[in-house]
Structures are given as structure tokens and as C-alpha cells.
Image (cartoon, rainbow, N blue to C red):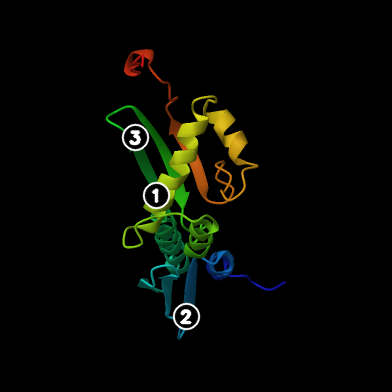
């Protein structure tokens, strides 16, 4: 029976997990990770956000914790990149009359999908502004109309079959977080007899 060095086995297991993690994250298409092993003395990786092009570089000396530290560092950077791709948009109508909050995950609802959604209808929007913000306003127009009849769950159900809009359940990266119900106040109407 051979003597197995437990430290070597632990390093091998950590490296295996690290390589599997890199493969998993690269397959998701949010980041590109390049992993290098330098002379069995150091682990280096570069993680690039594929949407912004920003890259982060890290290196860890290859000791008993080197692979585990690289693994923890990689997960931290990946989660920060992914977290920064989810944004909440609060849309208000009138002076405190109505508001809704949408969450858009740019890793799922990509700029390509956004462009398709904006081009689906003939809409007038500010092409120099943040296009996600412009699209959030377009969704909010439909949400306010539906909020006269439905609560949030009903609105989400209605959007699941609405042509030209993503479902608002988050499955395509757009999620309705909350919205007010919109009601007309009888006192706000004016009536003239002619």
C-alpha cells in the first residue's frame, strides 16, 4: 500500500474544484476566466466581464491554501461582477401618484435582447440615455394601465402572454418587484355642461 500525502490530496481536490468552477463560470457567458499554473508555485487568473470588458487579475502562491484562496477569490470577483449586472429601476408617474420598481439582470436581458425589445414597437425614446432606463419606462406604461385592474401577481400573469414584452417573473431577466395600484379620483375630474 502506497503512502498518500493528505496535503497533496487536499491540494489536488482544491485544484479540481477550482478548474470545475472556472469551466462552469465560462459556460455561463457572463465572464471569461483564464487560469494559469506557474511552475507549480503560483496560481494566477484573469477574470473579464464580457459585457464591460473590464478585467481583474489575481495571483496566489501555491501553498497548502493556495488553491483554496484562489477559489475563494474567484468566487468573490465573479459574484461582484454578477451583482453589478442586476439593477433596480424605480419609475414614478406624476407627483407621487404612482410608482413601480423593476429589476433588470443585464446578464440575462442582454443589450442584444434590449435592442430587439426596443425595436419591436415603433417607440420614441431617448437613444442617448441609458437604454435600460428607457425600456423600463416603456414597461412601466403597460404596468400602470394594468395596475388599474390587477395587483402585482395579476400584472405578472398578464405579461407572461403579452406580445413584445418579456415576462415580469425574472425568467428573461426582467422582474416586477412592486407597483402601486392606479386609481382615478372622482374629485380630479371636471365637468362642464354645454
Checking the image for residue 93, the label placed there is 3
Q: In the image, is residue 83 above or below residue 20?
A: above
Q: CA distance from mark 3 to mark 2?
A: 52 Å
Q: Which residue is mark 1?
A: 87
Q: Residue at x 54, y 67 (%)?
A: 29
Q: Closest to the observer: 93 or 40?
A: 93
Q: Closest to the observer: 33 or 109?
A: 109
Q: Residue at x 36, y 62 (%)?
A: 127
Measured as percent of width and height from the top left, residue 168 is found at 55, 42
Near mark 2 (Cα within 10 A), the count class, few <14, some 14-19 or many ≥20, is few
Measured as percent of width and height from the top left, residue 146 is found at 52, 31
**Which element is circle 1 on?**
strand
Q: CA distance from mark 1 to mark 3?
A: 20 Å
Say which label, 3 or 2, has the lower sequence index: 2
Say which label, 2 or 1, has the lower sequence index: 2
Measured as percent of width and height from the top left, residue 46 is found at 41, 75
| Residue ranking furthest to the front | 194
| Residue ranking furthest to the bottom | 39
Checking the image for residue 175, the label placed there is none
Q: Which residue is mark 2?
A: 36
Q: CA distance from mark 2 to mark 1?
A: 33 Å
Q: Residue at x 33, y 17 (%)?
A: 190
In this view, the mark in front (2 or 1): 1
Whether residue 62 is visible to the viewer of this picture, yes or no, is no
The quadrant of the picture occupied by the C terminus is top left
Q: Are marks 3 and 2 in contact (CB under 8 Å)?
A: no
Measured as percent of width and height from the top left, residue 176 is found at 49, 38
Near mark 1 (Cα within 10 A), the count class, few <14, some 14-19 or many ≥20, is some
Amino acid at each position: 500500500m502506497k503512502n498518500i500525502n493528505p496535503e497533496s490530496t487536499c491540494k489536488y481536490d482544491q485544484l479540481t474544484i477550482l478548474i470545475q468552477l472556472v469551466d462552469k463560470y465560462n459556460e455561463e457567458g457572463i465572464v471569461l476566466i483564464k487560469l494559469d499554473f506557474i511552475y507549480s508555485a503560483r496560481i494566477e487568473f484573469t477574470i473579464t466581464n464580457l459585457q464591460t470588458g473590464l478585467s481583474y487579475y489575481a495571483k496566489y502562491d501555491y501553498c497548502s491554501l493556495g488553491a483554496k484562496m484562489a477559489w475563494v477569490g474567484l468566487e468573490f470577483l465573479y459574484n461582484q461582477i454578477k451583482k453589478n449586472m442586476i439593477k433596480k429601476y424605480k419609475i414614478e408617474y406624476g407627483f407621487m401618484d404612482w410608482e413601480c420598481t423593476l429589476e433588470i439582470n443585464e446578464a440575462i436581458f442582454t443589450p442584444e435582447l434590449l435592442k430587439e425589445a426596443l425595436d419591436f414597437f415603433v417607440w420614441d425614446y431617448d437613444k442617448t440615455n441609458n437604454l435600460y432606463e428607457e425600456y423600463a419606462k416603456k414597461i412601466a406604461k403597460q404596468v400602470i394601465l394594468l395596475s388599474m385592474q390587477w395587483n402585482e401577481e395579476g400584472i405578472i400573469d398578464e405579461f407572461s402572454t403579452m406580445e413584445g414584452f418579456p415576462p415580469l417573473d425574472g425568467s428573461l431577466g426582467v422582474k416586477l418587484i412592486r407597483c402601486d395600484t392606479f386609481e382615478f379620483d372622482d374629485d380630479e375630474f371636471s365637468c362642464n355642461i354645454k
